[in-house]
Amino acid sequence: GQQLNQSPQSMFIQEGEDVSMNCTSSSIFNTWLWYKQEPGEGPVLLIALYKAGELTSNGRLTAQFGITRKDSFLNISASIPSDVGIYFCAGQNEGSGGGADGLTFGKGTHLIIQP
Amino acid sequence: ETGVTQSPTHLIKTRGQQVTLRCSSQSGHNTVSWYQQALGQGPQFIFQYYREEENGRGNFPPRFSGLQFPNYSSELNVNALELDDSALYLCASSSGGRLYGYTFGSGTRLTVV
């Protein structure tokens, strides 16, 4: 099945550093979402973006919806140990029945924080 | 608290067998979708149900089927299990309409031997 192109695949950073990851697609999405998944858990929604060009923050997290509607990025400022996990981007369009289609996910960015 | 509960948490089945995975969504969440997450990959969309009818399907064969019940619970059934079906199966629910992101359960880890 289709997966979005997400990079980098993994990041090894020091506590306190800023983090940036992005996601690209060959097709347009009307909604971009960013999720975080920790071991043994399902993905948890971090930020949802609904308009091209939209920039949205959630605490230390900031995400943008690309103007082409084919990309998005997520930034994390001043990383802390609890930021460790796998971050997934996901795109979504409206379905033919007026509701929403299923999510198309990237392969994830594995964030590791070194002491 | 996610509000979405999946059972069982782990399951081992033999190739060729059939399996049923269960999900209990939050009250009022009339949209439920199922995803397959292989090791090291992002979740892949299997299908979605809205008010007990399938209204979207990903690239999965017909041996993957589902049901949604009026009490906000749902099932994923997989027939004729193959080794490649080994994965984490995630259920996600939403109140529908313009979505504000699905709420995911913790998943069922299925191993096919």
Image (spheres, coloured by chain):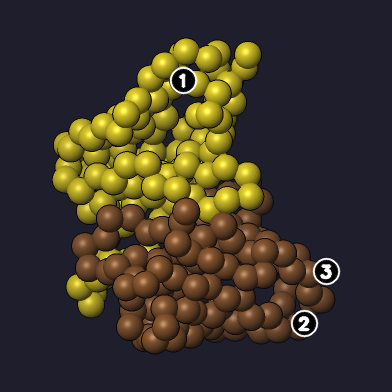
Chain colours: A yellow, B brown
Give the amino acid type for the residue marked by disc 1 in the picture: Ser
Q: Which mark, residue A95? A: none
Residue B13 vertical placement versus A42 (above, below): below
Horizontal arrangement in the rendering, residue B29 relative to residue A35 (left or right): left
Check the picture and name the quadrant holding the C terminus of chain A: top right
Residue B105 vertical placement versus A81 (above, below): below
Q: Nearer the viewer, residue A24 or A54?
A: A54
**Picture quadrant of residue B21:** bottom right
Q: Is residue A64 visible?
A: yes
The answer for which chain carries disc 1 is A
Q: Position of residue A63 (x, y in %)?
A: 30, 33
Q: Same chain for labels 2 and 3? Say yes or no.
A: yes
Q: Is residue A4 visible?
A: no
Q: Residue at label 1?
A: A79
Q: Which residue is located at x 39 percent, y 25 percent?
A: A76
Q: Position of residue B41 (x, y in %)?
A: 58, 49
The answer for which chain carries disc 3 is B
Circle 3 crowding by C-alpha within 10 Å: few under 14, some 14–19, many from 20: some
Give the amino acid type for the residue marked by disc 2 in the picture: Gly
Q: Residue at label 3?
A: B113
Q: Which mark, residue B16? A: 2
Q: Which residue is located at x 26 percent, y 32 percent?
A: A57
Q: Which residue is located at x 67 percent, y 70 percent?
A: B8
